[in-house]
Image: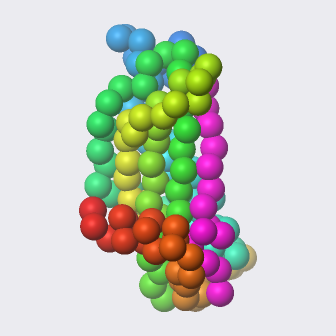
Amino acid sequence: MPTLLETKVETRRYIFPGQSNAIETAHGGDLLKWMEQVGAMSAMRFAGTDTVTVAVDDVKFHRPIPQGSIALFDAYVSEAGESSVTAKVRGYDEDRHTGERDLATEAVCVSVAVGDDGDTVTVPDLTVETEEGKRLHQAARDE
């Protein structure tokens, strides 16, 4: 059975002018797309098969990410049902020179595991073994 920490995925995007809005901050639509993608990667790692996203919930934009910054996204599976997988996704404004980060956005992505035929398949139970895993699991539940 996969552990919570084994489902953790992280990726980065450089915020170029093409991903920016009129006030030179990351466009919300691009942020949502990237968040959904990293949430799906985490869900697929957990499920061991493809998944399809069925919901992106509880989206919060805490602060803008300026053009020229690095957007860091991380996700981990916080819940599993019979065929559903819930991933907590966070996006940070990461300073490209120092690596310092500030939470900029977060969401919950819900996916359903599917087999080669497109039908839903059962996912394993989520296990939480380490103190860090327990902390992340509790943080996702507290939201």
The residue under the point 54% across, 24% down is: 95
In the image, is residue 11 part of the stretch drawn in magenta? yes
Q: What percent of the width, then of the height, locates residue 137?
A: 43, 71
Count the labels in the image: 0
Confirm whether residue 8 shows in the render: yes
Q: What percent of the width, then of the height, locates residue 138?
A: 37, 71
Determine the image quadrant of residue 110.
bottom left
Confirm whether residue 113 shows in the render: no
The residue under the point 32% across, 71% down is: 141
In the image, is residue 112 part of the stretch drawn in magenta? no
129 and 140: which is toward the camera: 129
55 and 68: which is toward the camera: 68
Q: What percent of the width, then of the height, locates residue 66?
A: 44, 19
Give the quadrant of the N terminus: bottom right
Q: What percent of the width, then of the height, locates residue 26?
A: 44, 24
The residue under the point 45% across, 84% down is: 81
The residue under the point 45% across, 66% down is: 136
Q: Which residues are magenta?
A: 1-14
Q: Is residue 104 left or right of residue 53?
A: left
Q: Relative to 142, say whether 130 is above or below.
A: below
Determine the image quadrant of residue 55.
bottom left
Q: Relative to 138, say whether 16 is above or below.
A: above
Q: How is the image coloured?
A: rainbow
Q: Relative to 103, say whether 123 is above or below.
A: below
Q: Is residue 13 left or right of residue 139?
A: right
Give the quadrant of the C terminus: bottom left
Determine the image quadrant of residue 118.
bottom right
| Residue farthest along the front direction in this orientation | 131
Q: Relative to 142, say whether 65 is above or below.
A: above
